[in-house]
Image: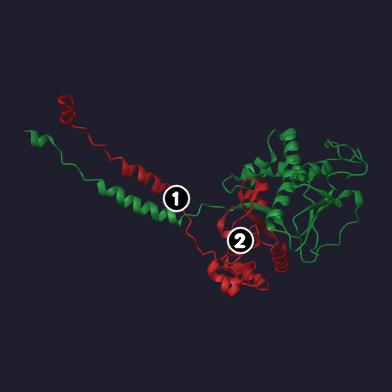
Amino acid sequence: MSKFNKKKDGDLPAVSTASLPDIVFMLLFFFMTVTVMKDNTIKVKNELPKATEIKKLEKKDRVITIFVGQPNQEYQKVFGTESKIQLNDKFANVSDVGDYILAERAKKPQEVQNFLTTSLKVDKDANMGLIADIKLQLRKVNALKVNYTTYEGDAFSNIQ
Amino acid sequence: MSKRLKSPEVHAGSMADIAFLLLIFFLVTTTIETDSGLDRMLPKKNPDPPKPFNERNVLRIAINGENQLLLEDNPIGIEDIKSKAIAFLDNGGDAKSCNYCKGANDPTSSDNPLEAIISLSNTRETSYGTYITVQNELVGAYNELRNRESQRLYKVSFTDMHAHYLDANTPTETKNALREKVKTIQKMYPLNLLEAKIK
């Protein structure tokens, strides 16, 4: 009996949590540095396909983004379930793409206006018909450099 | 005496809570950058009339509405696209104009990589995922050939060299030196990837 009692007397030192803030701060700084604040809410399903032969998109200020995909649940009542184009914060029609590109191009500084890339962030279940229409619009406004934005990964996983 | 030795402890217990709160905020707002993808140039609005070409210099790939692939009207699995494209591009059918080709010299296939054209067509119902996979495989075929030649000539892979060339942090002198090499390799295997009009 006394054997067990004795142990109680020995003070077990509490686990020091003093380094916990340091660890958390380290994580915090990591996330602070990699964070890009979302500049627009995506209103469409946007699960990008995967590819292996990808190139990085350099310089954020030279990129115009177009989102394509099925509208999210809360917008489906109004916009249906067909794939839609999202420009900035709004749903748009194919015919608006050209004007949007021109407007965005005009906003950029003069010296980069000729080096703009259009990043197409398209859901992998979207149909090519809509993409072809967008590409036609892009050609009309001479925005020829496109980037099919993808995740890095096995390309064959795009096909179920 | 003993009192003086003991230094008062700073209570750091709540520091962790504060840091956690911030951490969670940044965790939620973080979108890890996904900005990489397949670069492509669209043709001009009024493209120049196409040069006359030989039928054997064109490899036709079609994707139908059910996401099935046809290579020259024969069904083909998506895994085989890359090897077929490489065989086609690297064929060197006329034997003399392409001294770096290591293909089969099949006279019914492409003459040389400069004239070899891959034509990709799809329908409106084709899914984007399939399209990207095929594009990825075709770009992969070109990259593999370019890497091979780049390794032979410069002992460095083309994709690394090109990424280094495009990197904004690369100094200008290095860029100028790289430009020549990149251009040379690109000239050996130009990316002749056509996209047919959608039917």
Q: Residues within 10 Å of mark 2 (few under 14, many from 20)?
A: few
Q: Mark 1 = which residue? A: A33
Q: Position of residue A139 (x, y in %)?
A: 73, 65
- Give the mark toward the camera: 1 or 2: 1
Q: Amino acid at mark 1?
A: Thr
Q: Mark 2 = which residue? A: A112
The single residue placed furthest to the top in the displayed view is A3
Q: Position of residue B114 (x, y in %)?
A: 84, 47
Question: Rounded to the nearest whole Å, what is the CA distance between mark 1 and mark 2?
Answer: 26 Å
Q: Position of residue B136 (x, y in %)?
A: 70, 49
Q: Amino acid at mark 2?
A: Val
Can you tell which chain is drawn red?
A: A
Q: Is residue B54 visible?
A: no
The single residue placed furthest to the front in the displayed view is A1
Q: Residue at x 62, y 59 (%)?
A: A123
Q: Left or right: B37 with respect to B24?
A: right
Q: Quadrant of the N terminus of chain A?
A: top left
SS of the residue under disc 2: helix
